[in-house]
Amino acid sequence: MPATMRAVRFDPVTGRPEVAEVPVPARQRDEVVVKVAACGIRRSDFAWLDGSAGPRGPVYTPGHGAAGVVAAVGDDVRSWVPGDRVVVAAGRECRDCPECRAGLSPDDCSDLRLMGEHYDGAWAEYLVTSATALVAVPGAVPLEQAAVLPGALSIAYGAIDAARLRPAEAVGVWGSGGLGNHLVRLARICGASPIIALDRRPEAREGALEQGADVALHPANNRVASYIGEITKGRGLDVAFDFGGRDSTFAQAHAALGARGRLVLVKTASKGSLVTRMFAEGEVGRTVISHTGYRVRHLRDLIELTERGRLDVSASISAILPLTRIAEGLAKVREYEDNPPRLLLRP
């Protein structure tokens, strides 16, 4: 292992990311060092870069969700050896919550530690994480494509898992940007039928149809409710996914549900919003599920789908940039807020 590496370092005081030479992080006995092949620039990174997620401490390395090759392992690690190709989950177990103390699976941890938030992230030549945060990447899957999976695809797949989606169930997707269109694609793989996408932007609706939606509607159309009724043959939606997180999208999605439908709110409802008011008063029959993030098991499933050719993520990469162009990459993702390009950094 080299003594130093290049990494993007972000100073909350200056607000500027800069590439610097820093020590390669030391590993603990149960940790793994991964040589990073690629890591995405995602909208979620801005929550910390802009300070909206809360105050940050000292200078740190951002970036979460990456793929690469195991470079070194701690003395207690038996599941990985140097040279293994892996994708890295954005979170690791806290080791201190009741679930962790009870010895349950890291996926059961109730207080995950997040890369780029609780410890240095993946915009670097090397990263260190728990051995349990890794999933093997078969040789048939390019590491750059594997790096796309922790993010929009895994969150969308996690939402589908949370909904317990079954084949032939009718699905509505409110918000057909990056996350929504990935969910459309995965819902089609899972056998959902019909799939109805709703978005105000024509390019988003067109993208949803390309990803496998049966119908794409403008949510402001005053016939949306009747259209959904006709398309679902009167039964309504079995599952609605709300990526908008606004009262208007929640109300429309909720009204489109069948008698026992489930609504997955992928963005957290704010205090005093329609969803919190409605369920404070009591709701019968229908179910609302709040969903964020994903688990390591979701990455395993996505790798399987990618290896078998069920899921093609090659089109989900807009460009691959070197670390030195981090400022340019951040500017591009920020500029296209509703439908940002899918950029990767290659150390």
Image (spheres, rainbow, N blue to C red):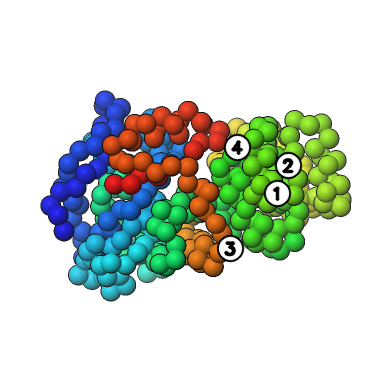
Which badge, 3 or 1, comes first in the chain's sequence? 1
Horizontal side of residue 90 vs 261, given as left or right:
left
Q: Secondary structure at mark 1?
A: loop
The residue identified by callout 3 is: 310
Picture coordinates of residue 237, whole percent (x, y): 76, 51
**186 or 60: nearer the eye?**
186
Q: Can the viewer see residue 311?
A: yes
Q: Report crowding for label 4: few under 14, some 14 to 19, many 20 or more residues within 10 A (C-alpha).
A: some
Horizontal side of residue 314 vs 253, given as left or right:
left
Q: CA distance from mark 3 to mark 4?
A: 30 Å
The residue identified by callout 1 is: 213
**205 or 260: nearer the eye?**
205
Query: Is 97 rendered above or below residue 53?
Result: below
Residue type, mark 4 in image: Gly
Q: CA distance from mark 2 to mark 1?
A: 7 Å
The residue identified by callout 4 is: 245
Q: Can the viewer see residue 155?
A: no
Q: Secondary structure at mark 2?
A: strand
Q: Report crowding for label 2: few under 14, some 14 to 19, many 20 or more residues within 10 A (C-alpha).
A: many
Residue type, mark 1 in image: Ala
Which badge, 3 or 4, comes first in the chain's sequence? 4
Looking at the image, do the residues carrying marks 2 and 4 touch, with CB atoms under 8 Å apart? Answer: no
